[in-house]
Image (cartoon, coloured by chain):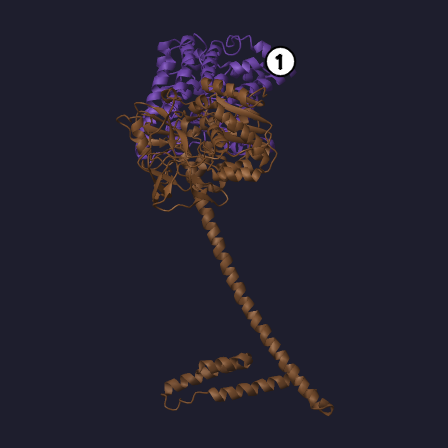
């Protein structure tokens, strides 16, 4: 017996996920234009591995395979892993990360909707801890053409220093840690562009455009991107104003690393994130805080992934403590 | 005059499908062969039968008197003969039959003598309310709540709201009524305003009903000076009473509270018209406007007598092939009729012929991805996804903590859910489980109370017995003392050793006598085994006798009888 409501909006999980994939396309386009088509190889590889892993695990779990494959959630995870990785990591690294994300982070917890941690970020963290040097190879713009990218992906030996340099954030931190340089002098290195890493900074614009489109479509709400970006900007802004020679400008922080990718696509993962409006603000603000601390004082090139995982752990508490007041009880909200 | 509108959070905008039937003026539905007039307009309101099978009734004649606190009267919708009183199917998802008066119309449609209720102002409020109750006036918005109860509470009323929002898709009965009978509605509204003492009337109509708004505006200026027709944004469920109150006044009425406590009364436009017809024309509530639409060839709106079997109405609109169910009410909150022989009741505003094209079966349920679409759609600001987890895990305590019972089951969350989870079903399940547990709990409480009372009663009887015995002992004591006193002052020394001893002696003597008297005499011929058994029993009995002497004599005697 079917009960009311008898009508349903024409929407499905696959609509949500396909919108996310579409929103990533501008950034992917800019990526190919600025850095090279190697990223496309990675995307295809990750997609295939993700779908295969999903099908394998579902078969082992004796669950229907087709609905899960067509909901496109595994592809979103795969793409986010690729986009947060350097484009020239070897194929097995991408594969490993995707397998960890899909099998360990997603399905060992019960599959779609059950995972407490962002699968893409679990994959990222596992790889950056296990293979820090490979994960730090961000090719500067124009240094590696498509055929050499392909070679590197397929496992050609690497002459690291010749082809890869550090990212803007990396050069900044290592430079500052040596204690001799200041931010303005470091910024004169060729790795820096207008806002952040030369070339890379424009890809961020793609994420911004896609993200705004997602907000306009109602797929994500404004809370997390706004909270994440504004807290990151505020923290870096305050320290930059206090000591501009030792702290980079907010603009550099916003345009560097995966800040914009994270703000619109990673922090906003619905399954592992907070769900209440105030909870979303808190959650994203927490990630921004951890990100900034790791970026400035930590040992890793970027801290977003760790911020996401740490805040994922706080989600049940955040959600519980930020339940919005119910209709008619706005006057006497009891928990803040 | 209200200056600005407020908004409630959430809400959805499904396709309205109102164009199908809104163009059709209200037509009179033909007399059916038989009418099944239920003796209860909703599950709580009852009426007491006052007619017998075979009796002739006139149109508007009372056939059931108001019974109980929420009772309202019910009336013969047309003239004819009461054929029988049967339990008949009702338009209710439970499909439980309800006592109905079956009337066979004589076709003459002859009214009883109609007496307008003159001069509301001169009558005491209670008289008017009783009159409305006896005219069978209940809310026509769907819940069929008795109107006299709603008017009745003795609080200061500031605003009377007429609900003409009609936010559910497909339904157009209120829209048509407002277009065609705006004057009657407004007269009813001013009567209601007078009864409640409201200072102003606000009429809320969704802004997709331009013609109804125009008609009502015209009538409003004519009939009541302090009334205002307000176009509210078309956003389901704007017609929910609390949502409409919020939109018009900004006041949010919490769950479990009535608008009355905030100086607001809210009535459906159809109810206002029924009040007008009852008071000004002396006509009880015997018919209502019903939209018949959906997968039909000629959707329309009909004035239908209460008690008309729904299956008799369907030929009027010619259902198309492929119709697989009929919905009672709208698609968001209505239900599929389990039995088409059920009659139109006072809460029936719409019947929709459903087909798999119009109402496709829901897609398979996928896991919740916590996307929060439901929270954004919820008009009462719940977190449906949390409630879903708790209901699913049967964690009903948590569900209640997260305000499960504030849920109005409007269906917005399920409507928007990308995982196609039938969320409202989960909440209905949780609610009914909680109710069932409460019932069980109450029953257990009652059993415990009964048990405790039984223990108390046994205890009380025991102590009463003890008191009685003590009184008897005191009496004997007093007698002995008197005797001793009578025996002389010189016996003082002898009597000194205390009356208690004497008492015990006397009692022992009595027991001894009784024992001898009652000792079994037929033990001579018993076998040895039995004898030894008796001896054993006697031995066991001895300490008992010494211990609890006064009664033992008697019971021992009884035992041996």
Which secondary structure lies at badge 1? Answer: loop
B324 sits to left or right of B61: left
- Towards the viewer: A199 or B192: B192
Which of the pair A326/B148 is nearer the observer? Answer: B148
Q: Which residue, as the protein is rendered here, is positioned at the far right? A: B489
Q: Is residue B138 above or below residue A278?
A: below
| The furthest residue to the left | B321
Question: Residue at left 56%, top 19%?
Answer: A232
Image quadrant assignment for residue B245: top right
Quarter of the image that includes the C terminus of chain B: bottom left
Q: Quadrant of the N terminus of chain B?
A: top right
Q: Residue at x 39, y 16 (%)?
A: A22
Q: Which residue is mark 1?
A: A245
* Count of numbered marks: 1
Measuring from the top left, give residue B501's x and y in whole percent: 63, 85
Image mark 1: chain = A
In the image: residue B310, left or right of residue A317:
left
Which chain is represented by brown in the image? B
Q: Is residue B106 visible?
A: yes
- Whole-percent x, y for residue B28 in the image: 36, 27
When the figure is inspected, residue B400 is found, relative to residue A300, above or below; the finding is: below
Q: On the rendered structure, is A18 left or right of B228?
A: left
Give the residue at x 56% y 67%.
B460
**Chain letter, purple:** A
Q: Quadrant of residue B524?
A: bottom left
- Residue A25, given in percent of the width and then of the height, sits at 40, 14
Q: Is residue B381 visible?
A: no
Q: Residues within 10 Å of mark 1 (few under 14, many from 20)?
A: some
Image height of A163 relative to B61, above or below: above
Observer-nearest of B540 and B281: B281
Quarter assignment of residue A109: top left
Q: x, y (%) of residue B357? A: 30, 25
């Amino acid at each position: 017996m079917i009960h009311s409501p008898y009508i349903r909006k024409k929407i499905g999980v696959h609509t949500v996920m396909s919108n996310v994939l579409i929103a990533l396309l501008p950034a992917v386009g800019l990526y190919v234009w600025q850095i090279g088509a190697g990223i496309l190889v990675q995307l295809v590889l990750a997609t295939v591995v993700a779908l295969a892993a999903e099908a394998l695990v579902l078969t082992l779990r004796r669950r229907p395979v087709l609905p899960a494959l067509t909901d496109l959630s595994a592809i979103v995870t795969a793409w986010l892993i690729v986009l947060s990785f350097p484009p020239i990591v070897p194929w097995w690294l991408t594969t490993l990360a995707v397998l960890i994300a899909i099998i360990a982070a997603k399905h060992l917890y019960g599959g779609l909707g059950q995972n407490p941690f962002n699968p893409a970020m679990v994959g990222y963290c596992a790889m950056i801890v296990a293979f820090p040097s490979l994960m730090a190879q961000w090719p500067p713009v124009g240094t590696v053409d498509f055929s050499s990218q392909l070679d590197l992906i397929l496992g050609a030996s690497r002459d690291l220093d010749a082809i890869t340099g550090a990212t803007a954030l990396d050069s900044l931190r290592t430079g500052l840690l040596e204690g001799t340089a200041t931010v303005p002098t470091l910024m004169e290195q060729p790795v820096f562009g207008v806002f952040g890493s030369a070339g890379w900074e424009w890809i961020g614009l793609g994420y911004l455009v896609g993200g705004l489109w997602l907000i306009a479509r109602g797929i994500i709400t404004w809370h997390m991107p706004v909270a994440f970006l504004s807290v990151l900007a505020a923290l870096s802004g305050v320290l930059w104003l206090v000591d501009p020679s030792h702290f980079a400008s907010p603009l550099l922080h916003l345009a560097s690393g995966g800040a914009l990718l994270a703000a619109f696509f990673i922090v906003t993962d619905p399954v592992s994130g907070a769900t209440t409006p105030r909870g979303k603000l808190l959650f994203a603000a927490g990630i921004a805080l951890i990100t900034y601390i790791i970026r400035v004082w930590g040992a890793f090139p970027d801290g977003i992934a760790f911020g996401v995982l740490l805040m994922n752990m706080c989600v049940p508490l955040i959600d519980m403590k930020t339940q919005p007041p119910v209709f008619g009880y706005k006057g006497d909200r009891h928990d803040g | 005059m209200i200056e600005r509108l407020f908004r409630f959070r959430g809400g959805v905008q499904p396709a309205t499908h109102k164009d199908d039937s809104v163009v059709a003026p209200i037509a009179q539905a033909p007399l059916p062969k038989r009418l099944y007039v239920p003796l209860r307009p909703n599950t709580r309101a009852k009426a007491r039968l006052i007619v017998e099978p075979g009796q002739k009734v006139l149109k508007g004649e009372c056939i059931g008197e108001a019974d109980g606190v929420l009772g309202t009267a019910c009336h013969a919708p047309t003239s004819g003969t009461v054929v029988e009183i049967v339990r008949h199917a009702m338009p209710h998802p439970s499909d439980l039959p309800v006592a109905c008066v079956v009337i066979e119309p004589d076709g003459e449609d002859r009214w009883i003598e109609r007496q307008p209720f003159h001069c509301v102002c001169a009558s005491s409020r209670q008289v008017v309310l009783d009159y409305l109750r006896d005219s069978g006036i209940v809310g026509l918005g769907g819940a069929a709540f008795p109107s006299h109860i709603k008017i009745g509470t003795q609080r200061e009323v500031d605003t009377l709201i007429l609900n003409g929002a009609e936010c559910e898709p497909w339904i157009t009965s209120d829209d048509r009524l407002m277009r065609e009978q705006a004057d009657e509605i407004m007269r009813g509204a001013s009567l209601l305003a007078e009864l409640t003492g409201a200072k102003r009337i606000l009429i809320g109509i969704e802004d997709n009903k331009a013609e109804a708004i125009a008609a009502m505006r015209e009538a409003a200026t004519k009939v009541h000076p302090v009334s205002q027709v307000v176009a509210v944004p078309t956003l389901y469920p704007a017609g929910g009473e609390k949502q409409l109150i919020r939109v018009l006044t900004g006041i949010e009425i919490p769950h479990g509270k009535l608008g009355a406590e905030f100086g607001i009364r809210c009535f459906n436009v159809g109810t206002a018209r029924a009040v007008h017809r009852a008071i000004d024309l002396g006509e009880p509530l015997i018919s209502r406007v019903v939209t018949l639409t959906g997968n039909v060839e000629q959707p329309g709106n009909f004035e239908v007598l209460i008690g008309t079997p729904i299956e008799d109405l369907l030929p009027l609109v010619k259902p198309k092939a492929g119709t697989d169910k009929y919905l009672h009410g709208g698609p968001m909150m209505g239900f599929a009729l389990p039995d088409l022989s059920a009659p139109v009741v006072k809460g029936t505003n719409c019947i929709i012929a459903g087909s798999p094209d119009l109402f496709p079966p829901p897609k398979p349920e996928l896991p919740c991805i916590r996307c929060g679409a439901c929270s954004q759609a919820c008009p009462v600001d719940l977190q449906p996804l949390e409630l879903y987890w708790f209901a699913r895990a049967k964690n009903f305590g948590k569900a209640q903590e997260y305000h499960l019972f504030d849920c109005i089951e409007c269906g917005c969350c399920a409507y928007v859910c990308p995982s196609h989870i039938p969320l409202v079903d989960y909440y209905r399940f949780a609610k009914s489980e909680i109710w069932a547990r409460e019932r069980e709990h109450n029953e257990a409480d009652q059993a415990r109370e009964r048990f405790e009372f039984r223990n108390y009663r046994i205890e009380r009887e025991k102590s009463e017995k003890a008191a009685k015995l003590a009184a008897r002992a005191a009496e004997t004591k007093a007698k002995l003392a008197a005797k001793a006193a009578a025996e002389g002052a010189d016996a003082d020394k002898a009597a000194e050793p205390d009356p208690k001893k004497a008492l015990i002696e006397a009692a022992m003597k009595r027991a001894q006598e009784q024992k001898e008297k009652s000792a079994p005499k037929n033990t001579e011929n018993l076998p040895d085994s039995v004898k030894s058994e008796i001896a054993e029993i006697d031995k066991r009995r001895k300490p008992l006798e010494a211990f609890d002497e006064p009664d033992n004599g008697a019971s021992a005697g009884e035992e041996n009888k």
